[in-house]
Image (cartoon, grey):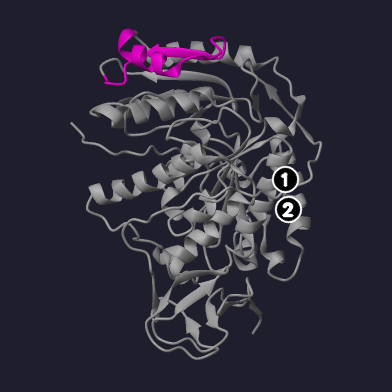
């Protein structure tokens, strides 16, 4: 049996055949389990060297609120690469890596109409169940996410489709949309016309004409905004796929690009490590609010803050939320945390950002796309076919899922487990991402899998 000890301080190793933890020395009852050099819980019974350490004999140490400390950060630099890709330059200085035409309905009532329009015209559509019977912040959240999707630079053209009687009125949505390229966005209210399908087809034909002359141009990699996400993590995720994405993130940031990481509940237990990398006291304070506000969200619904990991995570060898979070946050690499974004916001500069939002896979990838990310790196140990509104690169943490689901998986991180240098593989991933940014299709695109989901936190009328 091969074993990987991640940090010299660890008292458990990872079995390379199963991904589960095994004790590398005797561990007494109530003693801390150390992995990644940090406690991930404590054991509930005496454990002998060589025995498996999992949910049957250990549990979390997380409970309640935490007092966080600020310290002056020290950052590691990464050598910048002068790299380019070929994308579509937009009016606001952003760059699209795709040139799609998309139908975005303002309310779920017209989903069938939107789907019929998209099928007839051969364009994309993103349906959802919201846009009416919502109030206050919950309603504004829906508007913010839809507006962010309209403005995503991967759209060459957008038809915004309204019904006419919904809370999310066309006028209020246009106000939320703010500045946009008027030559690339059309609006249609179905109740105000006779044949909405025919009228929509006319508008989409205008958009097709608009994008017909668009050409890819050479663009600096600094224009890339990449979302970081993990789903179906396993015991290998924190050893291979997530650290690999972290190294990619460091390369991207050093080149002037932007990396955005979300999944706030999967920062619980590792949040101090992110706070230690806040570029200044203001970012530290915003990170503290990000974490505490999401904990309050759990409490407001009478839920246990640390109700994690999922059954799939446990089946893959993850035992506690601390363990999951310490693996998850490695996607952020070692760069400074430059800013904290609220749900529906987008970065106003380059660097590494934290984005408010839950860990749910579809909600998170939609959140990242609405924040302006042109593509998403999605690590997985269990496998998933999902695709978001932008190219969604699936990165496997273990070779078994890569071999089994090559029609889902784009890139394999498992060679790291067998000793391949992480930085060598990170440069290979970086080159692959540049190819995707220049037009190479991801598996979700080949399969035609792309959906959205919007975070809801409010009453339904």
- Residue under the point 66% across and 34% down: 224
Residue 30 is situated, as x and y percent measured from the top left of the image, at 39, 81
Give above or below for 426 relative to 455: below
Quadrant, the C terminus: top left
Give the number of the disc on residue 419: none
Give above or below for 213 relative to 21: above
- Residue under the point 42% across and 68% down: 320
- Residue under the point 65% across and 66% down: 399
> Quick check: 21 left or right of 6?
left
Asked whether 272 or 237 is in front, the reply is 272
Circle 2 residue: 426
Secondary structure beneath dot 2 equals helix
Secondary structure beneath dot 1 equals helix
Cβ atoms under marks 2 and 1 closer than 8 Å = yes
Give above or below for 137 relative to 24: above
Circle 1 residue: 251
The part of the image, by quadrant, that contains residue 373 is: top right
Highlighted range, magenta: 166-192
């Amino acid at each position: 049996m091969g074993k990987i000890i991640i940090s010299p301080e660890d008292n458990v190793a990872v079995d390379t055949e199963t991904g589960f933890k095994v004790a590398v020395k005797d561990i007494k009852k109530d003693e801390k389990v150390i992995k990644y050099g940090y406690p991930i819980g404590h054991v509930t019974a005496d454990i002998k060297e060589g025995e498996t350490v999992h949910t049957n004999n250990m549990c979390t140490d997380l409970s309640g609120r935490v007092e966080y400390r600020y310290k002056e950060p020290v950052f590691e630099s990464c050598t910048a690469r002068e790299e380019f890709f070929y994308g579509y330059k937009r009016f606001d200085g952003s760059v699209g890596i795709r040139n799609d035409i998309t139908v975005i309905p303002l309310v779920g009532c017209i989903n069938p109409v939107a789907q019929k329009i998209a099928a007839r015209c051969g364009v994309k559509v993103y349906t959802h169940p919201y846009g009416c019977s919502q109030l206050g912040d919950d309603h504004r959240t829906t508007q913010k996410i839809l507006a962010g999707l309209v403005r995503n630079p991967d759209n060459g053209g957008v038809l915004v489709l309204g019904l006419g009687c919904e809370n999310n009125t066309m006028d209020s949505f246009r106000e939320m949309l703010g500045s946009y390229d008027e030559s690339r966005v059309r609006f249609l209210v179905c109740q105000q016309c006779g044949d909405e399908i025919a009228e929509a087809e006319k508008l989409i034909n205008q958009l097709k004409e608009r994008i017909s002359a668009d050409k890819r141009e050479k663009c600096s990699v600094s224009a890339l905004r990449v979302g970081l996400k993990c789903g179906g993590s396993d015991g290998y995720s924190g050893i291979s796929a997530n650290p690999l994405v972290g190294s990619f993130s460091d390369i991207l940031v050093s080149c002037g690009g932007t990396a955005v990481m979300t999944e706030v509940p999967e920062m619980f237990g590792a949040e101090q490590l992110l706070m230690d990398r806040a570029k200044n006291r203001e970012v530290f304070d915003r990170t503290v609010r990000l974490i505490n506000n999401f904990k309050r969200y759990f409490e407001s619904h009478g839920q246990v803050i640390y109700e994690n990991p999922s059954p799939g995570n446990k089946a893959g060898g993850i035992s506690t939320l601390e363990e999951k979070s310490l693996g998850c946050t490695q996607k952020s690499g070692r760069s400074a945390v430059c800013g904290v974004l609220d749900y529906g916001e987008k970065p106003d500069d380059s660097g590494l950002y934290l984005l408010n939002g839950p860990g749910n896979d579809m909600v998170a990838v939609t959140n990242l796309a609405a924040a302006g990310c042109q593509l998403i790196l999605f690590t997985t140990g269990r496998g998933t076919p999902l695709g978001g509104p932008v190219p969604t690169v699936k990165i496997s943490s273990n070779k078994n899922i890569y071999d089994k689901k090559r029609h889902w998986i784009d890139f394999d991180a498992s060679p790291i487990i067998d000793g391949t240098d992480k930085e060598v593989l990170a440069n290979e991933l970086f080159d692959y991402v540049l190819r995707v940014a220049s037009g190479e299709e991801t598996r979700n695109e080949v399969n035609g899998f792309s959906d959205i989901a919007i975070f809801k936190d409010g009453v339904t009328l």
